[in-house]
């Protein structure tokens, strides 16, 4: 049964870097951030496995390094990847955490933000289950905004101005979360969540 945390109860412990009350599926694909480096950037991604299909165990399996290469033709190349994200927000709003926010998840790949290379070092990666051309769900916007507000509250190094898409830090290489992601709607929801929590 999915564990969907009410938006007002999305809480993050800055000491452990864990989000309370969400499903934890611990990934081996992480390492320590560089010394004295705090998260300063939030990167929003989109993902579906197999491409264009939702539900199922495959995203968990990808991020834990257990994706079976023979389960789908599109998995052959992906099965050997060593990738992760800090969290995934499924279509129904369920939040799944793979890596502590204090650690470096392997989500952005070759990337740069405002001239600074290697975004994994100083960012938090949030995956939305979806595709570039499929509208994201109301539940996903609600939970993403609540999670973002909670992260902003837990880490003073983060700010609203530094929330971007994967396509912004890896232009030409990545397109997600895509044209279907409504940035104005999301940013307005974040402001509402911050106003409620202040």
Image (cartoon, grey):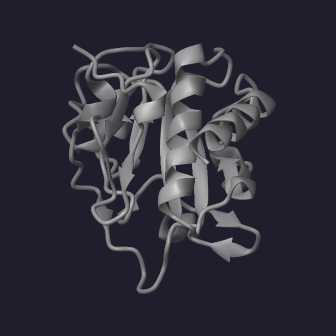
Residue 167 in view of the camera: yes
Q: Is residue 167 left or right of residue 184?
A: left
Please give the name of the residue rendered at 39% of the width and 44% of the height, measured from the top-left corner.
11
Task: In the rendered view, tell whether residue 54 sits above or below residue 98.
Answer: above
Task: In the rendered view, tell whether residue 198 sits above or below residue 52.
Answer: below
How many numbered marks are there?
A: 0
Q: Quadrant of residue 197?
A: top right
Q: Is residue 151 left or right of residue 63?
A: right
Quadrant occupied by the N terminus: top left
Residue 101 is situated, as x and y percent measured from the top left of the image, at: 39, 58
Seen from the viewer's position, the closer of residues 79 and 137 is 137
Residue 135 is situated, as x and y percent measured from the top left of the image, at: 66, 15
Q: Is residue 182 left or right of residue 92?
A: right
Point out the residue furthest to the bottom here: 35
Residue 68 is situated, as x and y percent measured from the top left of the image, at: 20, 30
Please give the name of the residue rendered at 42% of the width and 25% of the height, measured from the top-left corner.
6
Task: In the rendered view, tell whether residue 187 sits above or below residue 58.
Answer: below
Q: Is residue 171 left or right of residue 125?
A: right
Seen from the viewer's position, the closer of residues 191 and 58 is 191
Please give the name of the residue rendered at 48% of the width and 21% of the height, measured from the top-left corner.
51
Residue 50 is situated, as x and y percent measured from the top left of the image, at: 41, 20
Point out the residue furthest to the right here: 184
Q: Quadrant of residue 31?
A: bottom left
Residue 46 in view of the camera: no
């Amino acid at each position: 049964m999915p564990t969907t945390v009410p938006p007002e109860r999305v809480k993050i412990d800055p000491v452990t870097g864990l989000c309370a009350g969400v499903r934890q599926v611990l990934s081996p694909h992480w390492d320590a951030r560089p010394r004295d480096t705090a998260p300063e950037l939030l990167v929003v991604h989109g993902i579906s496995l197999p491409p264009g299909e939702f539900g199922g165990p495959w995203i968990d399996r990808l991020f834990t390094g257990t994706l079976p290469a023979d389960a789908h033709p599109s998995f052959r190349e992906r099965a050997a990847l060593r990738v992760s994200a800090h969290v995934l927000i499924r279509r129904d709003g369920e939040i799944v955490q793979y890596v502590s926010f204090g650690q470096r998840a392997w989500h952005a790949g070759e990337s740069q933000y405002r001239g600074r290379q290697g975004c994994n070092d100083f960012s938090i990666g949030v995956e939305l289950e979806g595709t570039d051309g499929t509208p994201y769900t109301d539940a996903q916007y609600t939970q993403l905004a609540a999670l973002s507000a909670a992260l902003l509250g837990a880490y003073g190094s983060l700010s609203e101005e530094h929330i971007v898409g994967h396509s912004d830090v890896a232009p030409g290489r990545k397109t997600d979360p895509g044209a279907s992601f409504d940035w104005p709607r999301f940013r307005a929801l974040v402001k509402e969540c911050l106003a409620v929590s202040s």
